[in-house]
Structure formats: structure tokens, C-alpha cells
Image (cartoon, rainbow, N blue to C red):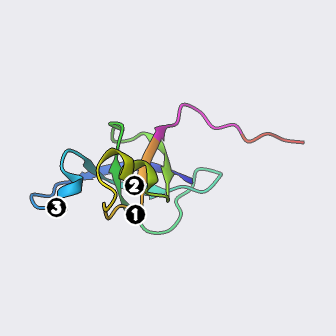
Amino acid sequence: MYLARIDGTVTSTVKHETLNGFRFLIAQRLEGDGSDSGEPQVLVDTIGAPVGSVVLVTTDNESVRKASANTTPVRLAVMGIVDSVYMGGA
């Protein structure tokens, strides 16, 4: 899992049948200090994350497979909207 910032949405008129009803989002993966990491990615939104929010992303499609069908071709999905991040010290 990792944190990402939602930067936009993707519209798809044709998609795998197991993804009907799910939104696609463009997200930028974040480092621990909040800086951007790598290229933007497309995520499946399972909870209604708004643009501009920071989310928790899963790289395991188990949750989406349970919500749709066991054969869904999803790898990255939003699992939570982050309220705050605390980086504890020693």
C-alpha cells in the first residue's frame, strides 16, 4: 500500500464488464515527505474519493474482486481517504 494524491478522473465509455459502476481516477504516488514519486497512475475508485484528496492505495486487487467479480483486471484501487499523516520520531 502507498499514499497518492488524486489529480483527476478518467472517462471510459467501454470497459471490462466487471468494472461497470466503478470510477477511474488519475493519481500521483507520494513519498513520505509528500513529494511526488514516479509517473501518475490510473486507480479504480471504490469509495468516492474527491479530486485533491490524499488516499491510501492498495496494490492487491482482492477487495475489488470481492466487490465485482473474481476475474476483474484491477491492480490498483483506492482503499481509504487520508485525514492526516503522522511521522513519529524516536
- Element under label 2? strand
**Residue linked to disc 3:** 15
- Residue at coordinates 47% horizontally, 39% vertically from top-left? 80
**Residue linked to disc 2:** 27
Where's residue 73, x and y in %? 32, 65
At label 3, which amino acid type do we have? Lys
Q: Residue furthest front?
A: 70
Name which quarter of the figure residue 31 lies in.
bottom right
Q: Which mark is residue 23?
A: none
- Residue at coordinates 69% horizontally, 37% vertically from top-left? 86
Tell me, yes or no, whether the highlighted magenta stretch contains residue 1: no
Q: Which tag, 2 or 3, sits closer to the chain's start?
A: 3
Quadrant in which the N terminus appears: bottom right
In the displayed structure image, the side of residue 82 where residue 26 appears, left or right: left
At label 2, which amino acid type do we have? Ala
Q: Which tag, 1 or 3, sits closer to the chain's start?
A: 3
Q: Which of 71 and 82 is in front in this view?
A: 71
At label 1, which amino acid type do we have? Pro
- Residue at coordinates 33% horizontally, 41% vertically from top-left? 51
Give the distance between the C-alpha atoms of the residues marked 2 and 1, in whole angstroms.
5 Å
Q: Which tag, 2 or 1, sits closer to the chain's start?
A: 2
- Residue at coordinates 49% horizontally, 58% vertically from top-left? 60
Magenta region, residue range:
80-86
| Residue 54, placed above or below residue 19 | above
Mark 2 or 3: the one toward you: 3
Q: Are marks 2 and 1 in contact (CB under 8 Å)?
A: yes
**Residue linked to disc 1:** 40
